[in-house]
Every structure is written in C-alpha cells, then in structure tokens.
Amino acid sequence: MSHTASPPLTPDPAARERLLRAAIRLFTQKGYAATSVREIVEEAGVTKPVLYYHFKSKEGMYLTALRDGMEEYQELMASFSPTDEPADLQLRRACLSVYDLFIRYMDLMRLFHSVFYGPQQGAPHFDYHAVHNLLVETLRRLVRLGMDRGEFKDGDERAMTLAVLGAFNIATENDMIHPECPVGREGLDRTLDIIFRGLKTTANS
Amino acid sequence: MSHTASPPLTPDPAARERLLRAAIRLFTQKGYAATSVREIVEEAGVTKPVLYYHFKSKEGMYLTALRDGMEEYQELMASFSPTDEPADLQLRRACLSVYDLFIRYMDLMRLFHSVFYGPQQGAPHFDYHAVHNLLVETLRRLVRLGMDRGEFKDGDERAMTLAVLGAFNIATENDMIHPECPVGREGLDRTLDIIFRGLKTTANS
DNA sequence: GTCTATACATCGATAGAC
DNA sequence: GTCTATCGATGTATAGAC
C-alpha cells in the first residue's frame, strides 16, 4: 500500500493567502520595485514556483492584492447616497467611515497612497484616480447639498470640498507616519468641527 | 606639436548638473529603486564612470539631490519667527510661502512626499521627519499664539493645527495628481478662509 | 502543487587605457 | 575626466522531476 505523501510536497491551501499577506507587507514597507520575489516567498515560507503557480507574475500579485483590498472600499463608497439628514452630519459620517476602513487596511492604504501621489515604482497600471474620485465626488455632492439647502454658506464649492478632504487626508497621513500617536476618530471629529464651523451659515458653538 | 583634444574626451562642466536633473526627474517619475543608473546617464548624455566620478554612488546622487533642494526650504522655514501681526495673517503667509516653494520644486517635493508617506524604496536614509516637523511646529506655534491672544477660540491645539496643515497638504497633493488643474495661491487662500472662520472667535465674513 | 536547478537579463560599480 | 569593457551579484521567471 502507498505511504501517505511526505510533508514537503503536499498541497498547502493557505500558501496563497500567506503569499498575499507577505507581498502586501513588503510592497508597503519597501515599495514594489525594491521588493524581490525571493523575499516574498521566504516570508511566506514557500518556494518561487508556488508564487508563479498561484499568480501569473509579480505584477499579478500586486494587482490581486490591490484589487482585493479595494472591494470593501468601493462597496462602502457606493453606500453613501444623500439622505434628508443635515449635510454636515452626512459629511462627518462619510469621513469617519472611510477613516475606520483606512485604519483596518492601513498597510494597503499606505501602498495606495505612495503609488498614487508618488512615483510609479515600476508597478503595473491601476486606476487609482477612479478610487480617489469616489471619495472626492461623494464629499463634493454633500457639500453642494449643504449649500443648496442653506445649511452652508454660499461660497467656493471646490475650496469647501478641499477643506473637508484636507481634514480627512491629514488624519490618515498623520497615522501613517506616527502610528504610535494616531489622530483617531475623536481627533478627526474635532478637526471636522473646525471645518464645519467655517462652512455653516450659523456659526453656533 | 600637440593637437587639440578630441571632443569625446574633453571635460564637460555641465555634466554634473545634467546628471542631477536627470536623476531627480527619473527618481520622481519611477521611484528610487525602479530607476537604473543606465537610464540616468543615458538621459544626461554621459557614460557611467562620469556619474561615479561626480557622485560616489547611486545613493550619493539621491542624497545630493535631496539635500540641495532642501536648503532653500530650510532657510524659508527659519524665517518664520512670530511677529505682532494677527496670527491668521502669519499662518496664511507661512502656508502661501511654502506653497510657492512647493510649486517651484514640484518634482523634488513629489519625491519627498512619496518616500516620506510611502515605502522606503530602498533609498538611503534621510531625515524626512525633521524637514516635515519644521512646518508642523511653525504652524503649531502660530496657532498657539492666536489662542493666547484671544484671536482664536480656545480649543484643541492639535486639531486646529491639523486643520491648517490639512488645507496646505490637500492643495499640494491636488497639484501633484492634477497639475493641469492646480489649486493655486487663490484656491489655497480660499480654503484657508474657511479654516480661519472656524478658528476665530469673531466669525466675521 | 511543490520541489531543485537553472536560464537569461539587468543591476550597481569598477579596472585600466587615454 | 571620460572612455570601453567587464565583473560579480541579483533580478524575474521557468523547465522538468515528483
């Protein structure tokens, strides 16, 4: 009778996931071009052919990791259809929800941020602008809503959107470079307080 | 008698500068790790030994480029000692001055931004935090000044600083990804109007 | 599906002539 | 100071056995 297969050659169902996690961590820490497939497979505890079996190439790994992580983000953004609530409340909820998601996917977001605002690093093409615009357009529509309703002062729509987006961005950027001292939901909330006081017609509190 | 030296071997005083410009452009567009010395020397129109003669290594090129560009920035930051003028005016002038500098050194700033917020790309160590803190601390001190004088509402100093810094950062980030549609001095000015209305005790205008 | 071993290109950096 | 030629290391990817 045949003996059970020896350990080194048995299929490893978790190998693919370990590879993805290792790749995200290394792409995030060192960048796409500076990360070698040798490092990825060593960290995942597999050999190179395993990587090339599960993914077509190093570029394939990158795109798979990025697209997988963006799914939840895109679902969240699609859920922000305007309601009857005050515009500042809706803006606040949108910013805080995306901030929560950002915290959970910190590594992936850092990778996204660096390739979106920075050099391409030889990484394969990905439609970063489409992802970014999802957030920008959501905020812009809510700002417009607040102006049309008279909740916000009549002013420069773009500047108003930039002010809100700036509060969100600076919170995430602070957390990327100072994870030991995060802004947190509360810090972002207080920053948004300032922005909304600048936007609203009645500058109460 | 000796004949004049043949063209291919004569010293080229401009070679060093062409190399630096090519390196900054390529590091900016492709990232440090993804840029090869072959590409740099080809774009500069020289051969590899010329690069290694003027700079010790690829890392030396990177540090030279970054440090040269930071000189003017550090001088500017050192010039922002608080005056008797209103705090919001001083904050506005600081933000706009750094924004002007940012526009002039766009490529270098993009490189800085990508390595500061993103992965290290195998690039040699540089004290990015020190440079960044120059701006943060300058803004924080002016916010503090405004609070102590009663020009700004008494509130969360960190959130107030983040709001101002966020307006500056989002303007520069917009220009990096949408250079065809820059925020401009005027756009940043209008965004700061909103922030200051949120900060000031008298919410006039 | 996973292994060992390797093909083949490109990398950063340098030797030595001029 | 600049050249040609090349070194050794490392890169991505794959062939072929099991």
Image (cartoon, coloured by chain):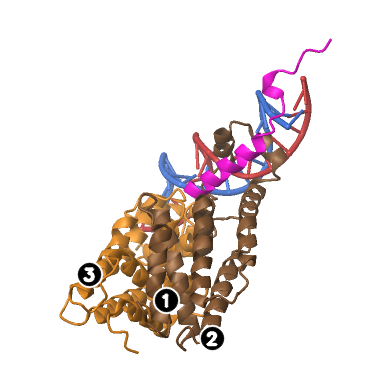
Chain colours: A orange, B brown, C red, D blue
Q: CA distance from mark 1 to mark 3?
A: 21 Å
Image x and y of residue A137, in percent:
26, 64
Region in magenta: B1-30
Q: Residue at x 42, y 72 (%)?
A: A172
Q: Quadrant of residue A114?
A: bottom left
Q: Which residue is mark 2?
A: B149
Front label number (1 vs 2): 2
Q: Residue at x 47, y 65 (%)?
A: A25
Numbered circle sitting on residue A50: none
Relative to residue C14, is residue B22 drawn left or right?
Answer: left
The chain carrying label 2 is B
Q: Residue at x 65, y 34 (%)?
A: B15
Query: Label 1's element?
Result: helix
Front label number (2 vs 3): 2
Q: Is residue B22 magenta?
A: yes
Q: Quadrant of residue A21?
A: bottom left
Q: Earlier in the sequence, mark 1 or mark 2?
A: 2
Q: CA distance from mark 1 to mark 2?
A: 15 Å
Answer yes or no: is residue B32 visible.
yes
Front label number (1 vs 3): 1
Q: Which residue is mark 3?
A: A144
Q: Are marks 1 and 3 in contact (CB under 8 Å)?
A: no
Report the amino acid beneath label 2. Arg
Q: Which residue is mark 1?
A: B196
Residue A127 sits above or below residue B14 on the image: below
The chain carrying label 1 is B
Image x and y of residue B21, in percent:
58, 42
